[in-house]
Amino acid sequence: MLSEEVENIWLHIVTWPRDIKLNLNSVSSNWMDLAEAIASGTILAMDEKGEEDKQEAMRTILNNENSRTAVGAALRWAVGSTANGGLELQLQSLPLPEAFISSKPLLKVLILNKHFCLKNLCTLNHD
C-alpha cells in the first residue's frame, strides 16, 4: 500500500527566499512537480533522522507505471498572511502531479468570458 511505502520518508527542501521567483502580479510561484524536484536534487528524500538516503525509493514510488491512480504532488511557494496580520512564505502542495494541475482548463479562473465556480462546481456564463 502506498501510505506504508512513504510513511518513513521525509522530504527536505532548503532554499533562500531571494531564489524564489513569484509570478508577476501574483503572490505565488509556478507549480513544480515533486518527481522532477527529487530527480533534480531540489528536494531530498531521507529517513526521519536525515541519515539514510531515500531518493531512489521515492523515485520508484513516483514513477510507478502500474499504479491505477496518479501518484505525485505539485508544490509552489506563496506569500500568505499570519494570524497577527504579518506575511510569511509558505510551501503549498496539492496531491497530484504538476501536469494534472497545469493542464486542467477548469482550474483557470477566467476562460473565454466564463468563470469557474468552485463552490457549486459549475460554470457561469457572463454574456
Image (cartoon, rainbow, N blue to C red):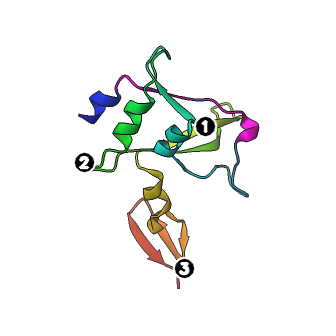
Horizontal side of 7 relative to 33 (left or right) equals left
Local SS, label 1: strand
Between the residue at mark 2 and the residue at mark 3, the CA separation in whole angstroms equals: 37 Å
Extreme residue toward the right, this view: 18
State the image coordinates of residue 11 (x, y, percent, origin top left). 49, 29
Residue that sits furthest to the bottom in the current view: 127
- What residue sits right under mark 2 in the picture? 66
| Callouts 1 and 2 close, C-beta under 8 Å | no
**Residue 93 in the image: x percent, y percent?**
49, 42
- Residue 74 visible to an observer of this rendering: no
Give, as a single range, the part of the protein colored magenta. 7-19
Q: Nearer the viewer, residue 29 or 85?
A: 29
Amino acid, disc 2: Asn
Q: Does the magenta portion include 110?
A: no
Around disc 2, counting alpha carbons within 10 Å, would you say few (fewer than 14), some (14 to 19), or many (20 or more)? few
The residue located at (38%, 42%) in the rendering is 62
| Vertical side of 41 occupied by 115: above or below | below
Pointer 2 with pointer 3, Cβ within 8 A: no
Whether residue 15 appears in this view of the structure is: yes
Q: Which residue is mark 3?
A: 112
Residue topped by disc 1:
90
